[in-house]
């Protein structure tokens, strides 16, 4: 029985045959107090991982993403209302959602560093409070410039620092069922888009956009409640909290390294450039679809339902492409490249649509492909970078992408008005994605020494209880 427990605890890790490690087992041994031993398998066997409270954390993360990404994915409802109220141009009004979406991704990396320093629980609680305040202030705004700050900056920053820490907590609390739990948590974003779009439309139609903002302000407090449930993982301790103290020393020593350790390998640079180009048009449909549907003769309600259909398609797509990607013979990078091309071509369905039914077909196809584009984005990052720098690489990619997302929706609004046909904005939703796919395909032609070295990793199995091996695994992020 003891041997089985030790086998469960000391998982194996693929270590590079050459190259420096940011944290090696030698450093771990050096950091540990001389007169203190690491806890044995028996000491650490009883934890809260995969237990009852772990599922509470999973549910809290689900609710967190339901609110955070649900609001961002359904910004088109408020966009149409603000367009009617302030009578400004489509391009100028679209900056509201664009700044918020820019902030959401730009502050992900700083948010991850704050979580490491102060803990996920505190960061999420503060994020929920800031989001609620920003939405409440937006309801009293008398100009778009004020909403740029209250909705774009305050809400964007608040949701950003509430986003990744929720997924980090799920990863902390689960071992055996981590992928399943992460899938449940991330589905909250899709259900948020499904439920919040028609609900906001009902509130806007009945009470106006200011009351809708106040409703969302109250809903954002759910994020704070979720943060309260993200209590730190409680290991059953023996002695003087030896595992906790030792790992704190390790992470404190490596914290400055993480700040300066930006990936520079060939594949990652190509991937960062390609994803930045491709995401230029990502939020264009989310911002403009409702107004496009209205100008084609559909009702406000039918227009908002299109955003819900995207959420449904994306949720199904994440499951489908996640399963396909897990097949050993499938090359995830090639699969992703193909889906990028198809995503870039899908806006043609909206540009040449003859009515509302064609728009529905477009958003369903877009949603399914979005399941690959977003659902596998972290996996592609994992494949294209040094595994020891995965967290830095993922935060860096999101930060870089935020700049192209910032200008996408306003540029599309300006392009539609300038060309005289509002539906032409969908050209800007598709063309950059195809350009990004072309850049990304260069990976197939360029060798990367770091990636090649990772494919030659040797299997190292711990021989003593005092040896601690850190396991790097794939991440799934929405």
Image (tube, rainbow, N blue to C red):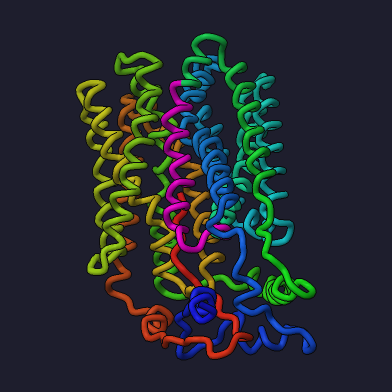
Residue 348 locus on image (x, y percent): 23, 37
Q: Nearer the viewer, residue 41 or 214?
A: 41
Residue 156 locus on image (x, y percent): 61, 40
- Is residue 39 positioned above or below 147 on the image? below
Q: Is residue 200 left or right of residue 244?
A: left
Residue 190 forms part of the magenta stretch: yes
Is residue 256 among the parts visible in the rendering? no
Residue 166 locus on image (x, y percent): 58, 49
Is residue 305 among the parts visible in the rendering? yes
Q: Residue at x 54, y 52 (%)?
A: 167
For this orientation, the residue located farthest to the top is: 206
Q: Main secondary structure of the magenta part?
A: helix
Q: Is residue 50 left or right of residue 230?
A: left
For this orientation, the residue located farthest to the front is: 1
- Is residue 413 positioned above or below 265 on the image? above
Q: Residue at x 63, y 32 (%)?
A: 220
Q: Nearer the viewer, residue 75 or 225?
A: 225
Q: Residue at x 47, y 24 (%)?
A: 77
Q: Which of the 4 image quadrants contains residue 33?
A: bottom right
Q: Where does the magenta region start and end?
A: 172-198
Q: Residue at x 56, y 10 (%)?
A: 207
Residue 167 forms part of the magenta stretch: no
Q: Nearer the viewer, residue 471 or 301?
A: 471
């Amino acid at each position: 029985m003891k041997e089985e427990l030790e086998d469960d605890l000391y998982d194996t890790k693929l270590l590079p045959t050459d190259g420096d490690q940011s944290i090696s087992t030698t450093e771990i041994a050096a950091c540990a107090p001389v007169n203190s031993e690491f806890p044995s398998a028996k000491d650490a066997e009883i934890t809260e991982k995969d237990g009852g409270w772990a599922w509470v954390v999973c549910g809290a993360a689900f609710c967190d993403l339901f609110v955070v990404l649900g609001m961002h994915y359904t910004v088109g409802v408020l966009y149409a209302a603000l367009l009617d109220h302030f009578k400004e141009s489509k391009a100028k009004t679209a900056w509201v959602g664009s700044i918020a979406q820019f902030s959401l991704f730009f502050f992900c990396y700083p948010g991850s560093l704050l979580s490491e320093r102060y803990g996920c629980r505190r960061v999420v609680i503060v994020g929920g409070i800031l989001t609620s305040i920003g939405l409440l202030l937006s309801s009293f705004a008398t100009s778009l410039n004020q909403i740029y700050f209250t909705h774009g900056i305050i809400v964007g920053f608040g949701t950003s620092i509430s986003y990744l820490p929720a997924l980090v907590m799920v990863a902390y609390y689960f071992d055996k069922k981590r992928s399943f739990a992460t899938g449940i948590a991330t589905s909250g974003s899709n259900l948020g888009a499904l439920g919040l779009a028609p609900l906001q439309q009902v509130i806007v139609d009945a009470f106006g956009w200011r009351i809708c903002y106040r409703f969302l302000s109250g809903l954002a407090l759910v994020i704070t409640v979720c943060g309260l449930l993200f209590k730190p993982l409680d290991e059953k301790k023996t002695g003087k909290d030896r595992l906790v103290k030792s790992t704190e020393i390790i992470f404190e020593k490596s914290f400055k390294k993480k700040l300066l350790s930006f990936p520079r390998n060939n594949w990652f640079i190509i991937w960062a450039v390609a994803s930045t180009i491709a995401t230029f048009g990502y939020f264009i449909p989310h911002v403009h679809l409702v107004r496009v549907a209205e100008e084609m003769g559909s009702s406000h309600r039918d227009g908002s339902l299109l955003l819900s259909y995207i959420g449904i398609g994306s949720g199904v797509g994440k499951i489908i492409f996640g399963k396909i990607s897990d097949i050993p013979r499938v090359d995830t990078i090639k699969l992703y490249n193909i889906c990028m091309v198809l995503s870039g071509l899908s806006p043609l369905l909206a540009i040449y649509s003859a009515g509302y039914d064609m728009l529905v077909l477009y958003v369903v196809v877009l949603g399914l492909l979005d399941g690959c584009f977003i659902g596998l984005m972290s996996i592609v990052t994992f494949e294209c970078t040094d595994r020891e720098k995965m967290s830095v690489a993922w935060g860096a990619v999101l930060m870089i992408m935020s700049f192209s997302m910032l200008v996408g929706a306003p540029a599309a609004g300006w392009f539609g008005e300038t060309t005289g046909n509002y539906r032409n904005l969908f050209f800007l939703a598709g063309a950059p994605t195809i350009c990004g796919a072309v850049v990304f395909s260069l990976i197939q032609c360029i060798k990367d020494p770091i990636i090649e070295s990772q494919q030659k990793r040797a299997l190292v199995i711990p021989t003593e209880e005092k040896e601690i091996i850190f396991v790097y695994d794939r991440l799934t992020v929405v």
